[in-house]
Image: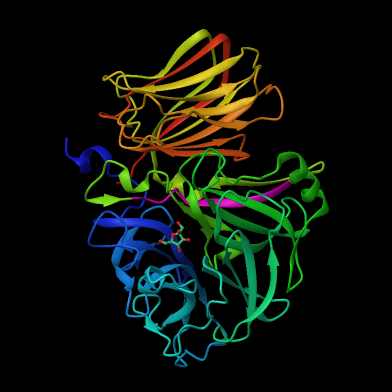
């Protein structure tokens, strides 16, 4: 089989050719979702002196069409990560009276400066589009925010703060967040710093995202700050953490309950898997929905994964909800509902009862390289429940719950090719669970080379990639006691 046949995802976005990492500048306008991404079009490893913003569009967040790269590097530097906003009121003055200006805010990374030992190689710049994001003009007065003497000073994420009628930019400043404000996207003033002594600090606080969100089921508004961190992730390398609090137009402050929560948990992770990085949200999505997409890889081994034509893909688009249970906040994510319209045939079963093991899928009844599995386990009494995806080569990807040591896990150590990097499959990914689970629900999204596990409606998520030598065709459950599956639904996705 060719690399294309074996590894190119069926429905997760990946460029036709070349390297990709972070999603950038995502926005929605007039029925179209735009995804830009860190891209080196001419080779499948990153060239940090020639980074572009690649571009893809979709009308449903699931099926993406790649366009030509939108913003290319120039003599001021490579185009690193950033965001884009729909400037409806033409605060920037870039509008022409007919078209809404879209303004992209990105980091210039000046490689020559960096190599000469300068500390100020990263600065923030803007570009605008008057044709719905297709073509871009860089602002003549770039950069709009010079480097204040901080080596890692990048990844501006901008949003419109309606209450204060200002644009707010959050960006990485080493292992802190800095916030700036502006009336016109061109002149920026420093607002505040966040991050001292809270959360994980094993690496740089890259690709932040601050946004308001309602506490689910109430009218209470909170602010969530997502902070991607590399290295220092939950299970090693790159990962995303978050904070819950309030924003007064100047400062982000943690909610007292969340502060307490962190004293115990130390870090709140958005995804416990190894392959969800640089997750940030779209601008301007209708109905106040907060939709995020991440890069489905990890800097620990991203440049070594065994593909050659291209490297890197996105996660499935996810909708975020903030829930508050007693005195605990969780930012939960679930796949966007648009995925459901690709469901074609399915297996549906109720009340499956078995002792110790049972086969749920075999003989290619379902193509497990494009499937969504939903199931609920009841009366959990055994110590472990292990789901096993396997192929005829004897490779297997396993996941499940350990109910005596209280954790959810995903094990890719025997899932196929893994010798390209020592860091790829050296450990089993674990997500700690509060206590014994009496019931558990799983939504699992399978593509050719990825698994996304949404446990208990997205309270815990594990996203990881794998490289098996032939597709998994069988799914079993194994336990050390009785198995009670209340509902099982396996949906085939009709999508390529
Ligand atoms: C995160 C990151 C960003 C940077 C970009 C460069 O993965 O390191 O901080 O802007 O990638 O491609």
Position above or below: 22 against 302: below
Q: Position of residue 460 (x, y in %)?
A: 60, 38
Residue furthest to the front: 117
Residue 124 part of the magenta-drawn span: no
Observer-nearest of 379 and 137:
137
Position above or below: 88 against 488: below
Observer-nearest of 204 and 327:
204
- Picture residue at 31% right of the left edge, 28% below the top: 416
State which image quarter holds ligand 1: bottom left
Q: Is residue 225 left or right of residue 348?
A: right
Q: Is residue 261 left or right of residue 416?
A: right
Observer-nearest of 310 and 486:
310
Residue 9 is at least partly visible in this image: no
**Quarter of the figure with residue 32:** bottom left
Residue furthest to the left: 1
Residue 261 is at least partly visible in this image: yes
User: Which contiguous range is marked in magenta?
Assistant: 312-323
- Picture residue at 49% right of the left edge, 74% below the top: 120
- Picture residue at 33% right of the left edge, 26% below the top: 472
Position above or below: 364 against 266: above
Q: Position of residue 41 (x, y in %)?
A: 26, 62
Total labels: the figure holds 0
Q: Position of residue 417 (x, y in %)?
A: 30, 31
Q: How is the image coloured?
A: rainbow
Q: Is residue 327 left or right of residue 104?
A: right
Q: Position of residue 355 (x, y in %)?
A: 53, 6
**Quarter of the figure with residue 342:** top left
Which quadrant of the figure contains the N terminus? top left
């Amino acid at each position: 089989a060719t690399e294309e046949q074996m590894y190119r995802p069926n429905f997760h976005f990946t460029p036709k050719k070349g390297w990709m990492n972070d999603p950038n500048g995502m926005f929605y306008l007039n029925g179209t979702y735009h995804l830009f991404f860190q891209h080196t079009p001419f080779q499948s490893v990153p060239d940090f002196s020639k980074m572009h913003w690649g571009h893809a569009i979709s009308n449903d967040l699931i099926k993406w069409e790649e366009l030509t790269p939108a913003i290319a590097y120039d003599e001021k530097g490579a185009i690193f990560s950033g965001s884009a906003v729909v400037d409806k009121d033409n605060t920037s003055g870039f509008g022409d009276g007919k078209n809404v200006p879209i303004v992209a805010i990105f980091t210039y990374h000046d490689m020559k400066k960096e190599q000469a030992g300068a500390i100020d190689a990263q600065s923030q710049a803007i570009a605008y589009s008057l044709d719905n994001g297709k073509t871009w003009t860089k602002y003549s007065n770039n950069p709009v925010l010079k480097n204040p003497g901080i080596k890692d000073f990048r990844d501006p994420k901008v949003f419109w703060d309606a209450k204060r009628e200002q644009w707010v930019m959050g960006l990485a400043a080493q292992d802190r967040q800095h916030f700036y404000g502006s009336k016109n996207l061109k002149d920026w003033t420093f607002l505040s710093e966040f991050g001292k002594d809270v959360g994980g600090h094993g690496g740089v606080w890259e690709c932040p995202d601050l946004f308001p969100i309602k506490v689910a089921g109430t009218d209470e508004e909170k602010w969530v700050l997502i902070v991607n961190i590399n290295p220092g992730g939950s299970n090693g390398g790159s990962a995303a953490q978050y904070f819950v609090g309030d924003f007064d137009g100047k400062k982000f402050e943690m909610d007292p309950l969340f502060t307490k929560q962190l004293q115990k948990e130390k870090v709140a992770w958005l995804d416990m898997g190894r392959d969800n990085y640089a997750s940030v949200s779209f601008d301007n999505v209708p109905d106040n929905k907060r939709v995020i997409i991440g890069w489905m890889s990890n800097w620990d081994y991203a440049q070594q994964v065994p593909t050659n034509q291209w490297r890197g893909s996105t996660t499935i688009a996810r909708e975020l909800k903030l829930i508050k249970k007693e005195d605990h906040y969780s930012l939960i994510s679930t796949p966007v509902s648009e995925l459901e319209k690709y469901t074609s045939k399915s297996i549906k079963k109720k009340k499956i009862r078995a002792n110790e093991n049972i086969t749920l899928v075999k003989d290619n009844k379902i193509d497990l390289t494009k499937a969504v599995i939903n199931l609920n386990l009841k009366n959990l009494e055994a110590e472990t429940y292990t789901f096993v995806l396997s192929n005829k080569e004897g490779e297997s990807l396993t996941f499940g719950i350990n109910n005596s040591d209280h954790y959810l896990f995903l094990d890719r150590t025997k899932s196929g090719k893994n010798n390209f990097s020592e860091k790829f499959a050296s450990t089993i990914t674990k997500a700690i669970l509060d206590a014994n689970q009496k019931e558990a629900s799983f939504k699992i999204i399978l593509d050719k080379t990825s698994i996304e596990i949404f446990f208990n409606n997205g309270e815990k998520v594990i996203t990881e990639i794998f490289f098996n030598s032939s597709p998994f065709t069988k799914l079993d459950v194994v336990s050390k006691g009785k198995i009670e599956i209340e509902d099982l639904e396996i949906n085939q996705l009709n999508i390529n």
